[in-house]
Amino acid sequence: MGLDLKDSLIGRFLTVLLFVTLSIAGIIFSIYLFYVAHTPYLYLLAASFTLLSLVAGFFNVYASVWYFRSYFYDAYLRGIESRLPKLGALPSVAIAIPVYNEDPGMVERNARKLLKMNYPKGKMHFYLLDDSTDKEKRDALSKIAKKNGIAYLHRNSRRGFKAGALNDMLRQSKEEYLAVFDADEDLVNTNFLIDTLPYFADGKVSYVQTEKRYSKNSFFSDSVDIFDAFFFKFIQPARALNNTAVFAGSCGLISRKALDKIGGFPEYIIEDTFFSFESDMHEYKSLYLPKVYALGRPIKTFTELVKQQWRYNYGDTQFIGYFFKRKGYTKGSPLSNLDYITHGFGLNYLSIVLIMFTIVSIGIVFSALPFAHFDFKNLLSSAQLSLYLELLGFFAFTLSLLTPVLLTRIYFRSFKKGFMVFLLNYALAFVRTKAAISTLLQTNPGINWNRSKFESKSGNAGYSISNTKSEIAFASTMFVLGGFALSQFNISGGIWLIWYGVLYSLSTFLLYKYG
């Protein structure tokens, strides 16, 4: 019988061993580069490669440890569940539905499903938190709320974004617990409250977060679902073992007592991460329940994905400054601190390192043109530095390709979607990087793309080109440099740079294809 990698502890251990080995190999190669360098140019290449190797090695090893530790979460959760008492007197629960210019028909459909939650009706109170700026939608949402017995709260200002709306609601409500569901989430399991409330029995848990997934739709949207599912399948369980499971903004239940002590939701663009951190700082426990109770509306267009990733990266960059300003590192355990630091730097690392490694690749390709003929005698000489670097670059690229592809095949039964996950990281690299820069410059947290009536439709070349100028310029540079390398008979280097040009053209292509 073959080894089932999906459920194999050995398979997970081998994955960690592979990443550790590769990280060590990268550092050893960096030392070698300094040893053979004999010009300022080569020293600069060596220093750049060393820095990237250290950063990539840290994040890759830490991610693999998350992957390994998540294997033990089911047993950890079963241990907690074996000690849970039966539900006694049922507490009151506020169910909040934040809305911002959403389709009223969708909001009503999903709200009606929430109203059917398996829980005493007199113990549930529903709130529609409407920050919509569209008057027609505001009027429709107000009527929907009144018709369905839902409290309607509208704000003329989006102060504090979603967190501000939730905090305003908290000042007008007194329920013992708060459940949050986004307007696009379709309840698929009515036992949400019955299942999550027992975990609060000891009074030390501030929130229970459940797994978030999107409804099935198209190849693109299902690939995006997998793109996010890695977080909930591997990172959330591993973080929960360190008491740093992230409240993901919805599909979660929160203790009102804990909320009041914490001071409500920090009013940032990604209030969920900030709230999770504050919960830990106030010495509360948190829990992750790997079970789906509601399915979000699928992300059908590349524009939607870009907006989501911009918001995530903008907020994560804010969080890094908040973390050190709040001096979280002086209170949490070393592991919990690493969890928060890697969470804040995660998307920044993924994007900036991709771009920086691409830039270093240009230096590598042009470090020794044309290639010298080599035989066994001069195989170890520094004259082959360019060849060694290019071979290592190809190897690193192959690994970055195989990791998401293989994991997607093992856990989600699809090579094609795994390949799309890999491609999306390159397609989003510039968007994420620009979001981080916007945070540092304290500019508008919304992405400043040119709008048009064709914004959400595919096949609009003008819209696609006008909104991906940076990516097009970078990709064009890679094509030109790759062509020059080929003209100098550097076949491997030329192909390498042209392939990077293709990867950074993906933003334009995906925006054109998927809208």
Image (cartoon, rainbow, N blue to C red):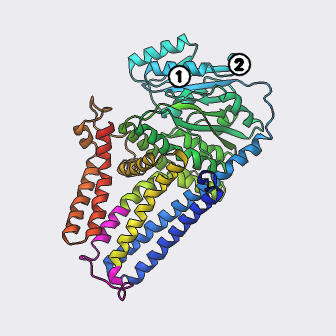
Residue nearer the viewer, 297 or 205: 297
- Classify mark 2: helix, strand or loop: loop
Q: Indicate the quadrant containing the C terminus: top left, top right, bottom left or bottom right.
A: top left
Do we see residue 327 in this rendering? no
User: Relative to 363, does residue 291 appear above or below in the rendering?
Assistant: above
What kind of residue is marked 2? Answer: Pro
**Residue at (33% x, 32% y) in the render:** 456
Residue picked out by circle 2: 120
As drawn, which residue projects farthest toward the top? 147
- Classify mark 1: helix, strand or loop: helix
Q: Is residue 388 left or right of residue 122?
A: left
As drawn, which residue projects farthest toward the left? 487
> What stretch of residues is rendered in magenta?
357-384
Q: Which circle marks residue 110 in the picture?
A: 1
Residue nearer the viewer, 260 or 188: 188
Q: Is residue 234 left or right of residue 422?
A: right
**Magenta stretch: residue 67 in it?**
no
Label 1 vs 2, first from the N-terminus: 1
Residue nearer the viewer, 394 or 243: 394
The percent coordinates of residue 441 (x first, y second) are: 38, 49
What kind of residue is marked 1? Answer: Asn
The percent coordinates of residue 314 (x first, y second) are: 44, 45
Q: Residues within 10 Å of mark 2 (few under 14, many from 20)?
A: few
